[in-house]
Amino acid sequence: MNPLERLQLASVEADLQRLEALLAESVIFGDEYLDGVTTHLIYAGGKRLRPMLAIASATSGAREATREDLLGGVALELLHLASLYHDDVMDEAEVRRNVDSVNARYGNLIAIVAGDYLMARSAAIAADLGVEMAGLLARTLAWLTRGQVSEVRTAFSVHRTEADYYEAIEGKTASLMATSCRAGAITAQLSGEETEALTEFGRCFGMIYQLRDDILDVIATDNQLGKPAGQDLAEGVYNLPTLFALRDPVVGDELRSILGEVLNDADRERARKLVVATDGIDRTILAAQSFLARAHESLTVLPSEELRSGFGSLIDSLLEDFPSH
């Protein structure tokens, strides 16, 4: 999925190019070593989905983004990057965005401290944008933390519930997408109705985005994923397709006998095939489609036909990319 191609708002693409310089400048401290750590993933690239959502929400592609619009996007991307620094330490990841992860290159301690620094810079930028933005970022950080704790708390648990799963992905993924859209509404001083509609769209976008990733983790190939298929199973993060499969009357017992601990390659592949053999994928797609319907409903409030069309195409592309099953 190329988000900018689906969005079809040319001015947003130009605004994101302007944002890149601000993003790097925002974390450069003047210390060569620290600057190398804090800009490591920035220079590695990325989709910049969260700034894109913020800028599109603010401008509808009808005007050039203001400095405030861009800084809102910078604050969000820094918060996202901080979470990646911390996640990679927890996951003992070695690669991120096709480069060495920060923890692999600099060590866990530096990665944690650098993530904290990015978080502090995000908070400072938000504070400069006003009390409402500062409060929004603080609440989002709380949601991110809650989602991460929920995921860790239920790791390797075959008794993990759908409520546990949704709590984790709403905190870890959807909250920041929702905040991205809301931040754009704040910097553009949109009406309360538009602000709430954009926030709901962002939340639904984030939920579908994670559901899509979880489906692909089970059914995509290693080459498509850039990591082994079924990696969530191996690491004890039992996603929605797996939760449905655990309750399957045919394979549920066998799957439970495999899960509950770190898996070797053979057991990971065996568990993955058991999940695929159930209706877990189809039921997860249905769950994603329910969020898609809510997202399209929220878009009807927006006055900009271009933004309705662009955001509609963007979120539709998440389900269009699902391989047939």
Image (tube, rainbow, N blue to C red):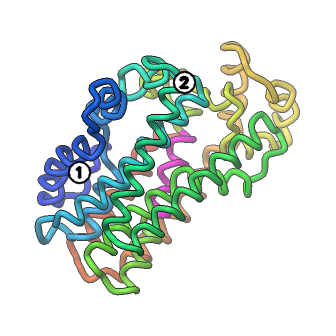
Residue 313, can we see it? no
Q: Quadrant of residue 191?
A: bottom left
Q: Residue at x 36, y 67 (%)?
A: 183
User: Above or below — where is 96 with respect to 71?
Assistant: above
Q: Disc 1 and disc 2: Cα gap in Å? A: 34 Å
Q: Quadrant of residue 235?
A: top right
As helix, strand or loop, the secondary structure at mark 1 comes to helix
Determine whether, in the image, residue 22 is placed left or right of residue 48.
left
Image disc number at residue 108: 2
Q: Residue at x 56, y 41 (%)?
A: 215
Q: Quadrant of the C terminus?
A: top right
Residue 271 position, x and y percent, is 72, 26
Amino acid type indicated by mark 2:
Asn
Disc 1 target residue: 4
- Which numbered disc, 1 or 2, marks the residue that appears first in the sequence? 1
Q: Is residue 59 magenta?
A: no
- Foreground residue, 168 or 84? 84
Residue 48 position, x and y percent, is 31, 47
Residue 283 position, x and y percent, is 64, 52
Residue 40 position, x and y percent, is 33, 29
Residue 123, can we see it? yes
Q: Residue at x 52, y 51 (%)?
A: 173
Q: Read off the magenta span.
A: 203-215
Q: Nearer the viewer, mark 1 or mark 2?
A: 2
Determine whether, in the image, residue 46 is placed left or right of residue 238.
left
Q: Residue at x 28, y 49 (%)?
A: 3
